[in-house]
């Protein structure tokens, strides 16, 4: 992964040559084989379930040095009819500062290190249909409804296991777990604050967000949620007392900085706070956090309470597009439950628990230096560089001041720490791509503060995913309904270009858009996000077979059938055929600006513009 460098003349010549030969290369090196079933699995993909189950968590060796190159990066962006499709733009963008990464060229070229050219994700080539058929529906339903995180008595199962640390999980054999110890109870008040069994706040707060198109949609396998917790100083007033209003205001200030937008708040007394939150030049009653950060023009913003004191003393920092030190994020990834009314919802059982903490502050200049050094290294090595991720699975892997760590199901369905290689997989998205905000995704996509609850609260407290479709600004196209644009660009609603249910829901047998389906989507994103009950059950079963194998290092994405759009081998610097990258200029918003005249979801001319 890295920044494209299409300016070097020898690379342009090479790309031109490959473009001229691309049809021959694709036929000989994977495309036709994938379609004919001859791409069943790359060589060396034979499995040994016993070996997988015996594999030690604390074995920190990396058998796949490029596990951060995720399976989606091996997708050939063409439909069955040979027409171009572009799921690549979801991740590979010209970053918004202080994200100095511009990997939009990855939409045009498979720029991979030599070590990554052979696809290691053999699970996605596997036909799981027989194994899926053998799993009983009622057993699967009961399985996903059983929590593997919180016991019936309120005890946190994973935390208890980590406190009684198994030797197999203890990397340095010091008898202590030196990473994140789960401490959220998923018991929320009406403002989304998490409470422990005694009713005391844990500091965690859940928020609703627009899932990134594709893999993050439940119809493609899993449901997710995200919680945030700021450092202790943000939760206290100027006298050091815990104060929920102070904390809510500081969270709103962070939201404004991440979104670079105004954020509505409950009325706040600026005189008591000593901060002009709405930037009207006087201390009164504020109902909005006004985003106004331009330090070169003498304009800045301030936290409130004890955090404001720490900011003035230089112990905490504030800048647009960056979280303050000590910020924590937590995501649970869950199976899908089908209730008695046939509604699909996030299940009690977790597939994964993902954790991030910002340990260190990097200024704009420091972040630019990191990106510049990586770019220079890649240019010198002609993109043939294997990234290094410092850290380990117990303490987490590090990227740009953040530490990332995760837990995943063991063969018995209980959560365990991810191995070193399983954790490296996570760094593909959080270790340096253009679409992220301070290496993260979710808060920048939080529901607008004008929505119910100001966007705070857990999905379990809402009517599922029934909110209006978000709008984004796309270079050359103007304001676009985000999910409709993705569906038109992929004709599938999947990063892997394979979701037959969505294809049938939004397109007819001739591939023409169904206008009524897109009109419904504009008002209710669940039309695209949620699978049918039948598909949800099959997705659960398919993932359960991966859990049984404990073969996550061969791919953890859910596939109901072998994915035919994957290349088993990628020719070096193979052109994708996409001539112009799609550039998203503004993040998802619940606001409904007048859509561009180019935004006709049912207009085939708009399709041609939207795809590549």
Image (cartoon, rainbow, N blue to C red):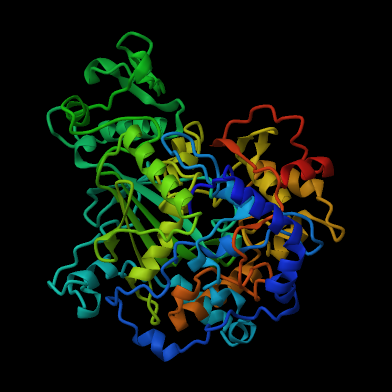
Q: Is residue 61 left or right of residue 122?
A: left
The image shows residue 188, relative to residue 509, as above or below, that is above
| Position in image of residue 50 (x %, y %) | 41, 91
Please tell me which residue lies in front, 53 or 206: 53
Residue 506 in sight in this render: yes
Looking at the rendering, which quadrant does residue 484 occupy? top right
Relative to 177, is 89 on the left or the right?
right
Return the x and y of residue 589 as percentages of the image width and height.
56, 35
Q: Where is residue 48 shown, x and y percent of the image?
A: 46, 89
Task: Say above or below: 356 vs 366.
Answer: below
Among the 4 quarters of the image, the one containing residue 93? top right
Given the current orientation, which residue lies at the most extreme front position?
10
Residue at left offset 54%, top offset 73%: 540
Is residue 155 visible in the rendered image? The answer is: no
Query: Is 383 placed above or below 348 here?
Result: above
Residue reaching furthest top?
A: 281
User: At 73% across and 55% down in the image, what residue appears?
Assistant: 491
* Viewer-nearest residue: 77 or 450: 77
Pick the front one: 37 or 276: 37
Q: How many marks?
A: 0
Lateral position of residue 486 relative to residue 58, left or right: right
* As drawn, 504 above or below 293: below
In percent of width and height, residue 57 lies at 30, 76
């Amino acid at each position: 992964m890295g920044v494209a460098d299409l300016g070097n003349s020898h690379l342009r010549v090479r790309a031109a040559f490959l473009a001229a030969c691309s049809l021959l290369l694709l036929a000989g090196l994977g495309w036709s084989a994938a379609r004919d079933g001859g791409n069943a699995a790359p060589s060396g993909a034979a499995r040994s379930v016993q070996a997988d189950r015996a594999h030690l968590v604390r074995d920190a060796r990396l058998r796949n040095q490029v596990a951060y190159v995720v399976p989606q990066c091996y997708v050939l962006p063409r439909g069955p009819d040979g027409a171009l499709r572009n799921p690549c733009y979801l991740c590979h963008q010209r970053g918004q500062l202080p994200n100095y990464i511009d990997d939009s060229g990855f939409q045009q070229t498979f720029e991979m290190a030599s070590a990554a050219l052979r696809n290691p994700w053999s699970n996605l080539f596997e036909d799981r249909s027989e194994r899926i058929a053998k799993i009983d529906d009622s057993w699967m339903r009961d399985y996903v409804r059983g929590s593997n995180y919180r016991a019936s008595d309120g005890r946190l199962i994973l935390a208890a296991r980590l406190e009684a640390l198994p030797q197999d999980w203890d990397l340095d054999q010091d008898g202590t777990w030196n990473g994140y110890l789960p401490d959220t109870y998923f018991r929320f008040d009406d403002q989304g604050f998490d409470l422990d069994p005694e009713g005391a706040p844990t500091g965690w707060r859940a928020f609703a967000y627009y899932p990134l198109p594709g893999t993050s949609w439940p119809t493609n396998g899993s449901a997710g949620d995200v919680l945030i917790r700021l450092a202790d100083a943000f939760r206290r007033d100027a006298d050091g007392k815990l104060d929920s209003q102070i904390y809510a205001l500081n969270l709103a200030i962070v939201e404004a900085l991440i979104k670079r937008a105004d954020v509505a708040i409950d009325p706040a007394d600026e005189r008591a706070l000593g901060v002009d939150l709405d930037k009207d030049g006087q201390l009164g009653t504020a109902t909005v956090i006004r985003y106004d950060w331009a330090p070169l023009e003498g304009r800045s913003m301030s936290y409130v309470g004890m955090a404001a004191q720490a900011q003035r003393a230089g112990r905490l920092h504030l800048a647009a597009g960056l979280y303050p030190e000590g910020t924590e994020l937590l995501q649970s990834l869950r199976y899908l439950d089908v209730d008695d009314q046939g509604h699909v919802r996030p299940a009690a059982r977790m597939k994964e628990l993902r954790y991030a903490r910002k340990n260190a502050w990097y200024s704009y200049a420091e972040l630019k230096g990191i990106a510049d050094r990586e770019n220079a290294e890649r240019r010198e090595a002609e993109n043939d560089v294997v990234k290094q991720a410092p850290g380990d699975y117990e303490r987490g892997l590090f990227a740009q001041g953040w530490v990332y760590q995760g837990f995943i199901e063991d063969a018995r369905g209980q959560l365990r720490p991810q191995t070193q290689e399983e954790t490296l997989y996570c760094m593909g998205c959080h270790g340096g791509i253009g679409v992220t905000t301070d290496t993260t995704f979710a808060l920048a996509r939080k529901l607008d503060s004008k929505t119910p609850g100001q966007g705070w609260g857990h999905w379990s407290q809402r009517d599922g995913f029934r909110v209006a479709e978000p709008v984004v600004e796309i270079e050359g196209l103007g304001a676009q309904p985000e999910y409709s644009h993705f569906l038109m660009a992929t004709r599938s609603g999947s990063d892997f270009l394979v979701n037959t249910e969505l294809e049938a829901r939004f397109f007819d047998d001739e591939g023409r858009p169904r206008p009524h389906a897109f009109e419904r989507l504009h008002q209710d994103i669940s039309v695209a996000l949620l699978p049918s009950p039948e598909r949800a059950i099959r997705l659960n079963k398919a993932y359960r077979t991966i859990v049984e194998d404990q073969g996550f290092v061969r791919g953890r994405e859910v596939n109901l059938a072998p994915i035919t759009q994957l290349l088993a081998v990628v020719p070096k610097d193979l052109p994708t055929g996409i001539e112009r990258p799609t550039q998203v200029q503004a993040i998802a918003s619940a606001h409904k600006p007048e859509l561009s005249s180019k935004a006709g979801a049912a207009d085939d001319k708009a399709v041609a513009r939207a795809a590549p």
